[in-house]
Image (cartoon, grey):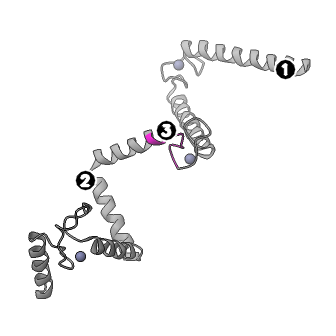
């Protein structure tokens, strides 16, 4: 540390101990409503913020800020989780998409993110089924299948019932269309 830097640091510390703004030396005790910072006055707080903002908009500042956030996240995993969870619930109860700030029009998500989530779960199911098929297991639940088939007994019963329901529905909508 250079001599100048050491001097200004000592000056800051002295001012802080005396209850003065450590940037400009204004008395903080007289600022009754000032609680945002205990070390600088409102003007210096604001100018510091402006400076920080400008700094964050430079390439180097952005990079350092990103690293700082990454480090903070890595060292506070439970805080990150809580913030994420809170944001999720806040969005959910106020009818906002849980992935962005659009209104939730499709369940808990906007049309775009609902479609994305559906695709992701479809993709997951497809991959899982493929894995199970190549391992010689029931593609729906992963238990040993009926010899010669890709499903186990319970899953076969279930799929048959689902098929029957779907067929009944198709038939119903057809007859409805014909009647109309
Ligand atoms: Zn000040
Ligand atoms: Zn969304
Ligand atoms: Zn099964």
Dot placed on the residue nearer the N-terminal end, 2 or 3: 2
User: What segment carries the magenta color?
Assistant: 90-100
Q: Relative to 168, is 53 above or below? A: below
> Mark 1 — residue?
174
Residue drawn at the location 65% of the way across and 13% of the way down: 161
Nearer to us of marks 3 and 1 is 3
Magenta span dominant secondary structure: loop
* Residue 1 is at least partly visible in this image: no
147 horizontally vs 84: left or right: right
- State how far apart marks 3 and 1 are (Cα): 38 Å
> Mark 3 — residue?
92
129 horizontally vs 88: left or right: right
- State how far apart marks 2 and 1 are (Cα): 60 Å
Residue 60 x %, y %: 36, 76
Q: Relative to 26, is 128 above or below? A: above
Nearer to us of marks 2 and 3 is 3
Residue 102 x %, y %: 57, 48
Q: Relative to 98, is 54 above or below? A: below
């Amino acid at each position: 540390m250079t001599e100048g830097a050491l001097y200004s640091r000592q000056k800051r510390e002295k001012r802080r101990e005396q209850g003065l703004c450590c940037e400009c030396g204004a008395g903080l005790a007289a600022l009754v409503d000032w609680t945002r910072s205990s070390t600088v006055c409102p003007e210096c707080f604001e100018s510091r913020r402006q400076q920080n903002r400008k700094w964050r908009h430079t390439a180097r500042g952005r990079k350092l800020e990103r690293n700082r956030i990454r480090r903070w996240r890595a060292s506070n995993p439970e805080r990150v989780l809580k913030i994420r969870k809170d944001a999720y619930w806040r969005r959910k109860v106020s009818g906002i998409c849980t992935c962005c700030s659009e209104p939730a029009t499709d369940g808990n998500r906007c049309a775009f993110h609902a479609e994305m989530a559906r695709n992701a779960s479809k993709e997951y199911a497809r991959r899982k089924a493929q894995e199970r098929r190549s391992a010689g297991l029931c593609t729906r639940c992963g238990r040993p299948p009926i010899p010669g088939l890709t499903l186990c007994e319970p899953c076969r019963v279930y799929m048959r019932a689902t098929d029957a329901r779907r067929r009944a529905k198709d038939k119903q909508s057809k007859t409805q269309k014909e009647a109309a």
